[in-house]
Image (spheres, rainbow, N blue to C red):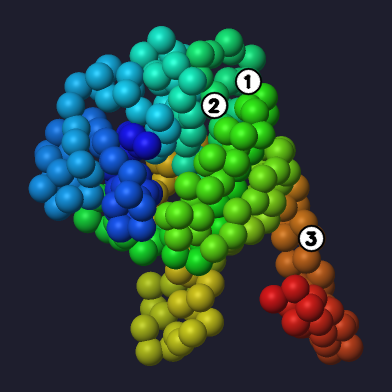
Amino acid sequence: MKILVLGLGLIGASIAKALKKNTNHYVLGWNRTKSVTEKALADGAIDETGKLDELLSQADITFINFYPDAIVPFVIENRDKFKKGSIVTDSCGIKSKICRTLEKENFDFSYIGAHPMAGREVSGYDASLATLFDNASFICTPTNAKKSETDTLVELAKEMGFKRTVVTTPEHHDEMIAFTSQIAHVLACSYVLSPLAPYHPGFSAGSYRDVSRVARINGEMWSELFISNKEPLIKEIDDLVLNLERFKEAIKEEDGKGLIELMSKANKIKEEIG
């Protein structure tokens, strides 16, 4: 197949590199900044580039790796340029807003939302890795696509090195991502906003590193993700605040028994679920 990767930042370029490393598919690539596309071509991360219209018209599968708010306008604006009968997908971290909007459109191709569950604290083409998705999860959120088309995308993900594939609804995806990813970034950012954070050297070890790691964040992109998924994320924030208040109250009242119960419950849950 000919597979087009649009956007050659961390995720897009890693998709291209994984395709080149693990499959025999022909990889087309395009990036808004031409120098990035040229570097990907020189590195062998992609096989070919060219004018956007020409690339869209020949790709059997197109991966769109743009910021959340840019995906729907791009697909609708270029609806007549995608290859008829092809599959168009994305790598965005939220799905409901995108998938439920695009399912209302009558396309000559199938749109299937997707989310490769991997990342790094650094971004851009130079941070991309052919091994980024090794042992990671690939989530598909089809709405009105045929099962055979979803199966094609799932099988491609397996070829690329993903260990686990999940097919679910856009809504369930967003609910789970609010818990497994977005709330962790909110927590990390809130944590390092402490006035004591600049003085951590010499006093910090694994706990500081683990909690603060994902505070290294692309604010522009993540603000779009947070707002686009606001209802599930707000629920998770409310739950987190409630639990923090429970700890605060127990500490304030010097309630050792209450603290032990809270930590024992958390420890048991962590041991059971991993």
Q: Secondary structure at mark 2?
A: strand
Camera-nearest label, 1 or 3 = 1
**Badge 1 density bin: few <14, some 14–19, many ≥20, Cα 10 Å:** some
What residue does disc 2 label? 111
Q: Is residue 60 above or below residue 204?
A: above
The answer to which image quadrant residue 67 occupies is top left
Q: Is residue 135 above or below residue 102?
A: below
Q: Secondary structure at mark 3?
A: helix
Marks 2 & 1, CB-CB < 8 Å contact: yes
Query: Can you say which quadrant of the picture contains the C terminus?
Result: bottom right
Marks 2 & 3, CB-CB < 8 Å contact: no
Measure the C-alpha gap from mark 2 to mark 1.
Answer: 8 Å
What residue does disc 1 label? 103
Q: Secondary structure at mark 1?
A: loop
| Residue drawn at point x = 36 percent, y = 52 percent | 23
Marks 1 & 3, CB-CB < 8 Å contact: no
What type is the residue that disc 3 sits on?
Leu
Residue 132, label in figure: none
The answer to which image quadrant residue 261 occupies is bottom right
Q: In this rendered view, identify the residue nearer to me: 222 or 38.
A: 38
Measure the C-alpha gap from mark 1 to mark 3.
Answer: 37 Å
Please indicate whether residue 4 sits to the left or right of residue 196 in the image: left
What type is the residue that disc 2 sits on?
Tyr
Give the x, y percent position of residue 129. 31, 60
What residue does disc 3 label? 242
**Mark nearer the N terminus (2 vs 3):** 2
